[in-house]
Amino acid sequence: MCLDCGCLEPANRHGSHDHIVLKRLQRAADTAGLPLREAAWNIPRTLAAMQDDPGVPLADRPALIFDCDGILSFTAEALCTALNARFGTTYSPQGQSFFPGTLLVHKLPAEQAGWLEQHMRQPSFVAAVSPDWHAMDTMRDSWDAGFSVSVVTERDPELQDATTDWLRDWGAPPVLVVAVGHGNKPAYLGAKYGPSNNAVLVDDNPAVEITIARPGIEVWTPQRPYTPSVPRDHVRPFAHWAQARYWLKLGPSPRL
């Protein structure tokens, strides 16, 4: 494009030399001694640093850890669709309360809970869940920007390879994937990260705000019907991925 208007025509000036075209950006990158892609990344990151917006961008580069279900994948939507098709229910992903980051089977009738648990252990179910493109793009762009990125999920360990394959199939970078099993994420992350080895965990499970958030480990959580509204230390809620990208210096303030 003229790189500023969104036309996707990189050499088109649209009759004005005020537009930024690819050749102009290449000259700027050459002057700075940078690859073209790195020079392009520095533009939104610089804009982010200039903005006065609630929520300060990160001052350093902590390890960046993504949860899978409810973050990288639309698992709640897949669960509602499966249950509605099998049992004739009318569950909505916008109002459901049985999947706040992890499956709470006691909130479902026993037959539905058992059926769902059985299917969630199948690699074929994992492979069919749709990705959240905003989250996947943020993970991919963080990797490209030089962050240490990994995926840590409470899925059963036997689903680790299926989760890795799912990420690869959807074009994710070759990040480390660890399936620790239900309830084991706090111990796993607590042993690896802290004040001397900072990390950010992106996770929508309300439990991690209590069990994992601490000095050295920030929890960033997208706002969901089931996420708490009470502020907590070391927890950053965000309404949309543009805000998280701003904190990572991957894009401008959402107010722009």
Image: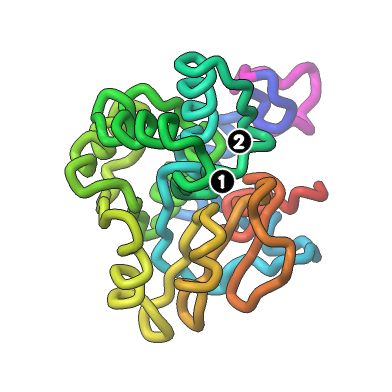
Q: Is residue 176 above or below residue 164?
A: below
Which SS type dominates the magenta stretch?
A: loop
Residue under the point 50% across and 79% down: 214
- Residue 60 visible, this orientation: yes
Q: Is residue 74 above or below residue 195?
A: above
Residue under the point 36% across and 35% down: 114
In magenta, the rendered stretch is 8-20
Residue 166: in magenta span: no
Secondary structure of the residue carrying numbered label 2: helix
Secondary structure of the residue carrying numbered label 1: helix
- Position in image of residue 73 (x %, y %): 46, 36
Residue under the point 63% across and 78% down: 233
Residue 14: in magenta span: yes
Q: Quadrant of the N terminus?
A: top right
Disc number at residue 120? none
Q: Is residue 15 left or right of residue 146?
A: right
Q: Amino acid at mark 1?
A: Ala
- Position in image of residue 18 (x %, y %): 79, 33
- Position in image of residue 237 (x %, y %): 66, 59
Q: Say which residue label 1 marks.
A: 28
Q: Is residue 144 left or right of residue 46?
A: left
Q: Is residue 197 above or below residue 28?
A: below
Q: Residues within 10 Å of mark 2 (few under 14, many from 20)?
A: some
Nearest the viewer among 19 and 170 is 170
Q: Say which residue label 2 marks.
A: 24
- Position in image of residue 27 (x %, y %): 54, 41
